[in-house]
């Protein structure tokens, strides 16, 4: 089968290869999926750059969609021919979705609702499930003000839609005119240009000095420095799913203590089974109702995987980047 892989960490054009690998066979409890699309996420780029390899080669990407074409022992044969989307394909294993066929545990191949295309389905595993878990952890949002950092990014765009559906007023941050428009398209009432505006001052202005009730955050390294400046009201909550500075983040303890602030962290790869099941069920309900939009910014052929990684890495793409393996 045709596939892309890397054997060492480094820049996309230096380490990504495209060629032939053996076609996998599904083991007990597994299915094999003939891939139509493979989603490229920021975490895939970071893994290629920095994460130590757990095998001689890594086929990247955790997200994707396709059709089951074979099943292993213990899996109902009726699943053959089923349209599915995938989650965690490359999490703690070397074989991801940047290939023509992938074998993985049957539970990680989720039946795709009717009317949902493969391009959109390549955006579910990381962006959609991250957003759904973040909003769930934030609790009921009716009447609350939610500050969404990176509201023009793939996850933030989804978070903004979900928060608005939940009755919140969203203040988003975004760093380019295109991403600011993207955040507004998702329903953000206000968008702060964090590159040119002082975020704490604008939040104070937009909340009459009170601060937001909740911050749903993609970059705790940056947000932690803003907490002493009042972006979050007393008894407020930060729900965080990432950080551009992943280690040694300084947090002002007095701000947390005397304002009774709550910090909640999670990583989408390690959701508890009950949380993942709830998020998947909620996702499908929203999809069937036409209440959640995923923007596919660019599509690439597998031969152009390096360009796809660069589009994510440089931030040029506003929306999700998808590799098409079949029409």
Image: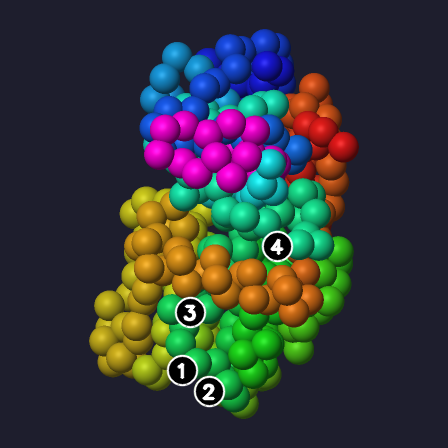
Please give the label number shown on residue 233: 1
Q: CA distance from mark 2 to mark 4?
A: 42 Å
> Disc 2 or 3, which lies upstream in sequence?
3
Looking at the rendering, in which quadrant would you find the C terminus? top right
Vertical relation: 69 (above or below) 206? above
Q: CA distance from mark 4 to mark 3?
A: 22 Å
Can you identify the residue that label 2 sits on?
A: 210
Disc 3, SS: helix
Disc 4, SS: loop
Observer-side mark, 4 or 1, equals 4
Q: Residues within 10 Å of mark 1 (few under 14, many from 20)?
A: many
Q: Which residue sits at x=61%, y=42%?
A: 83
Disc 1, SS: strand
> Disc 2 or 1, which lies upstream in sequence?
2
Whether residues under marks 4 and 3 lie with C-beta atoms below 8 angstroms apart, the answer is no
Range drawn in magenta: 60-80
């Amino acid at each position: 089968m045709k596939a892309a892989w890397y054997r060492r960490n480094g820049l996309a054009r230096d380490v990504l290869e495209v060629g032939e690998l053996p076609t996998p066979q599904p083991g007990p409890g597994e299915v094999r999926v003939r891939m139509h699309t493979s989603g490229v996420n920021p975490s895939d780029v970071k893994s290629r750059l920095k994460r130590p390899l757990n095998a001689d080669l890594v086929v990247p990407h955790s997200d994707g969609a396709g059709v089951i074409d074979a099943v292993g022992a213990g899996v109902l044969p009726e699943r053959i021919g089923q349209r599915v989307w995938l989650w965690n394909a490359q999490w703690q294993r070397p074989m991801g979705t940047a290939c023509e066929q992938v074998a993985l545990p049957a539970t990680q191949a989720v039946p795709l609702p009717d009317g949902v295309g493969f391009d959109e389905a390549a955006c579910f595993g990381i962006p959609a499930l991250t957003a759904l878990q973040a909003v769930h952890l934030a609790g009921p949002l009716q009447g609350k003000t939610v500050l969404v950092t990176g509201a023009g990014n793939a996850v933030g765009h989804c978070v903004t839609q979900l928060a608005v559906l939940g009755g919140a007023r969203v203040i988003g941050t975004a760093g380019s005119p295109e991403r600011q428009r993207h955040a507004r398209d998702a329903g953000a009432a206000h968008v702060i240009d964090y590159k040119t505006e002082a975020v704490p001052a604008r939040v104070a202005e937009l909340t009459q000095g009170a601060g937001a009730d909740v911050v749903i955050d993609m970059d705790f390294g940056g947000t932690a420095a803003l907490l002493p400046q009042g972006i979050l009201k007393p008894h407020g909550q930060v729900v965080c799913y990432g950080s551009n500075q992943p280690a040694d983040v300084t947090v002002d303890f007095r701000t947390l203590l005397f304002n009774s602030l709550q910090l909640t962290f999670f990583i989408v790869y390690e959701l508890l089974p009950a949380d993942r099941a709830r998020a998947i069920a909620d996702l499908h309900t929203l999809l069937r109702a036409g209440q959640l939009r995923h923007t596919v910014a660019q599509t690439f052929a597998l031969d152009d995987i390096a360009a796809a990684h660069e589009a994510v890495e440089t931030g040029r793409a506003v929306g999700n980047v998808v590799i098409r393996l079949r029409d």
